[in-house]
Image (spheres, coloured by chain):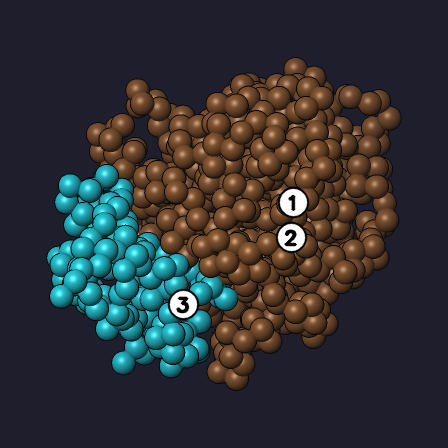
Amino acid sequence: MWILRVNMNDRIYRLSEVPEAYKNLGGRGTTSTIVYDEVPPLCHPLGPNNKLVFAPGIVTGTAASTSARVSAGAKSWLTGGIKESNAGSSWASYLANMRIKALIVEGQPKEKGKYWMAHITWDDGAGKPKVSFLPADPYTGKDLYEVFPKVYEQFGARAAIAGCGVAGEYGYGNSGIAYNDLGKRPSRYSGRGGLGTVMASKGLKFIVLESKGAPGVAIANKEVFDRGAKKLTEALREHAITKPKGGLNTYGTAVLINIMNEAGGLPTRNFSSGRFEGAAKIAGEAIFEGVKNRLGKEVYNHACSPGCIIQCSNTWYKPDGTEHTSCVEYESDWALGANCGIDSLDDVAEMVRLCNAYGLDTIEAGTTLAVAMEAGVIPFGDGKKAIGLVQEMGKGTPLGRILGGGTEFTGRAFGVTRVPTVKRQSMPAYEPRAVKGIGITYATSTMGADHTAGYTIGPEILGVGGKVDPLSPEGKAALSRGFQATTAFIDSTGHCLFIAFAILDIPSGFEGMMEECNGVLGTNWASEDAAKIGGEILRKERAFNEAAGIGKAEDRVPEFMKFEPLPPHNQVYDVPDKVLDSVYGEL
Amino acid sequence: MSDMSVDVWLYGPLARYGKEADQGSFANLQMRLPDGSNMDALLRRLGINADERGITFINGQLSAMPGLQPDLGYTLSDGDRVGIFHPKSMWPFQYRHGASMTEEMARAMRQEKDHGLHHTYEEAGDSS
Ligand code: SF4
């Protein structure tokens, strides 16, 4: 396998063997380790010393189900700390098929405002990947929906594309890296943390991959791998949430809108209530019914990337039956819907489409609009005006640039105190005052407020479940630690986090995941090792953050949550600081 | 015996039990029930078999999960809000750890395998 370094100072590249210490890393483990080892924690995120690292997961590119994920990592432009943000795309499998363990983008060109594309293909004769650089001028300053088809025209239908939108070119704190989905849409995102702008700061607009002729992923022990892949596939096919026509395949992640609303934990109108009266109109059930009405048939969801069994990605259609956007996920639906007081799926879908077109993170965009609404820029609930504000971001007007700076930046520009961020990244769709365990993860995650930071737990933590009461504050802290560590491991395997739902209930699925990794790497990991390996990754991330000036004083939810009771439960966030400190203190 | 009113929300395929209140993807109805009625009586009145429903909330407190239904004897009060979901709906554990639940549910969870740190309780938990 290769480490591929692309230096944007003078557009040269270098291939090297994978160092021994990196051999068993993948995905987030790879990106966070390289950022920790090579990026000066105090560097400017947009300066020449930051590095943008892409890494496929350990089993990405193999026949393992639901595993076409790529991690992107760097020092974050939004948080100032370490960032890993992963996405599902054929782009991930191509990287893995060319045996690229890590693609490291370094340096930056002298010319300002000049953009390039890196085209990475497999050189059959030499038996290794090669890179060529082409100017990206025709593609800058444009809508990604307009540009992606042209890039496909230039490089052929078998290419896979990663790139930044205008949000990155403008330098926004809110900017993601877009990847193609299976329908060639620019709709899969390493959305969080301003990585699109880090990419743009390197003068890099697109990375186009073509893995034709590449050897594919080397598997050390095929028998072990096959056994593991079979166990995991069976678990995914059997579990109510992940199976075909199960919860995710039918309603998508937006199935959680009504649930969180009933629980009183759906942040509404900039985190001022936990319940939205219009929730049922924008929920996953409403998307399913709405599509059925507009198309005259039931439509189950599709896969974002090759080999996904769960297939959670939906499509919203216009009244005339033509496609509006894909996909309206829970977080996007909530951020641009309930959190802005907007109950029209058509308006939400239009904003999701615009975010994809400009290269914006939908979560950060929605929470920013809500802060602007709180400031009185536009009223809560006005979908048309909200669409107008997203368009301002796309145009780069002065107001658009304030909003593009992100939620915290907008709060500062308008003097708003109710700003739902941790470490400068906005909270996703779970109210910490209603779901206190999530609040612990939001507060302490190395990534800033992040719903994907605490996603699954391994068997040894389940064992702890027998000793610590998961309802007590200490139990919640222990669980959050276990969640975060095992999640860092899954983020390294290349599996989509949604496998976590099945493997938490079906232990053979968890074993299967470990065996797949053992099969690829030739290791001997047991289920208990997941949290250990993940814990190592967290330690590096934490150390990077501390060296970057982000210590435990930032492991806190925003102050307003401590004194503003949240209806309908009328609770404040009361998890003591010492409990929050114990999450990493006892790692 | 006097009546009370309960604010009932039915989601997904359960919306059809809301009859004329059925909006396709949900139904919201104000139901009049005799004072002191419990959840079991509410479900009967709606015509919903207990195992046709999954996640359930009473006043924002989780009261039942698929395969774990300690709320059938729960006595409802005037003005209560009840949200009932189809078994297809999900609320993964990591998104509910620390959320409010009824006392009966908290007790039932504690008795489950691994303190109930699961998503489903039929196949995986030993809900006996
Ligand atoms: S479960 Fe959904 S997000 Fe995950 S890989 Fe499959 S389609 Fe993509």
Amino acid type at circle 2 is: Phe
Q: Is residue B35 left or right of residue A16?
A: left
Tell me the SS state at disc 3.
loop
Under tag 1, what secondary structure?
loop
The residue identified by callout 3 is B101
Q: Looking at the picture, does residue A267 appear above or below residue A8?
A: below
Q: Chain A is drawn in which colour?
A: brown
- Mark 1 belongs to which amino acid? Val
Q: Position of residue A455 (x, y in %)?
A: 52, 60
Q: Earlier in the sequence, mark 1 or mark 2?
A: 1
Q: How far apart are marks 2 and 3 (CA)?
A: 24 Å
Q: Residue at x 52, y 41 (%)?
A: A269
Looking at the image, residue A15 lies above or below residue A347: below
Q: Real-space Cα distance between discs 1 and 2?
A: 8 Å
Chain B: colour as depicted = cyan
| Chain letter of disc 3 in the image | B
Q: How crowded is mark 1: few (under 14 residues within 10 Å), some or many (20 or more)?
A: many
Q: Where is mark 2, residue-wise?
A: A560
Q: Do labels 2 and 3 share a chain?
A: no
**Mark 2 or 3, closer to the camera:** 2
Percent x, y for residue A342? 45, 34
| Chain to which mark 1 belongs | A
Q: How many marks?
A: 3
Give the image quarter of residue A169.
top right
x and y, in percent, of residue A382 in the image: 48, 27
Please give the chain letter of the residue carrying mark 2. Answer: A
CB within 8 Å, label 1 to label 2: yes
User: Looking at the rendering, which quadrant does residue A168 occupy?
Assistant: top right
Q: Is residue A318 left or right of residue A112?
A: left
Residue A34 is situated, as x and y percent measured from the top left of the image, at: 75, 53
